[in-house]
Image (tube, rainbow, N blue to C red):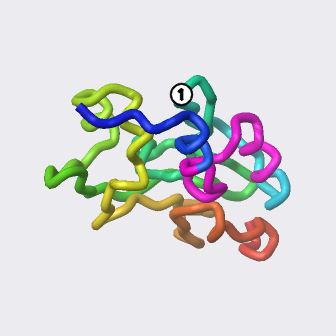
Amino acid sequence: MFPLLPFLGVIKMLLDNVNFIPVNTIGIVMSAFGWTHSESQNYSISGESLTVVKPDFYPNGHVLAVSKKAVIICDGESHFEYRGKEYTDIQEIIGEFGIQIIETFPEWVFTIEKEWTIMKNGEFVHSFSSLNELRHRKKLRC
């Protein structure tokens, strides 16, 4: 098995405001950037709920946010390594170790990452893999 980290250390480590954010803040963030939030994954880690922003936690085609002209969807593939074993799906590692494996997320080494892709009228506009790369909807003319 894997060691469980002390509660405060886990939450502090995971709440990086890039891959994981506090629950109920994703809608505020999306709105600040001009988007309407659709749906996100929440996980309970050490008794605290976190919203996952990293696209690797979502299936391809998942809609994160929309506007009148565009959509933000998950696209791509994941390849990451944990303790010498390669994985291609977050659900695979959760199935093997249980949901608490997310506590070890900082130890995962990603070699290929999914992205959030902004599509307007079926055409690629922009992509990002973390919130710190998200651009305002109006700057993208979406």
**Residue 18 vertical position relative to residue 49 in the rendered view, above or below:** below
**Residue 80 vertical position relative to residue 5 in the rendered view, above or below:** below
- Residue toward you, 130 or 123: 130
Residue 69 placed where, x, y %? 72, 58
User: 50 left or right of 69?
Assistant: left
Tell me if residue 129 can be seen. Answer: yes
Identify the residue at the far front of this view.
6
Q: Quadrant location of the N terminus?
A: top left
- Residue toward you, 5 or 51: 5
User: What span is in magenta?
Assistant: 13-30
- SS at badge 1: loop
**Residue 18 vertical position relative to residue 42 in the rendered view, above or below:** below
Q: Mark 1 Cα within 10 Å, few/some/many (few <14, many 20+)?
A: some
- Residue toward you, 22 or 34: 22
User: 113 left or right of 139?
Assistant: left
Residue at the (39%, 45%) spot, across then down: 104
Mark 1 lies on residue: 46
Q: Does residue 26 belong to the magenta stretch?
A: yes
Residue at the (76%, 65%) spot, across then down: 137
Q: Quadrant of residue 128 in the image?
A: bottom right
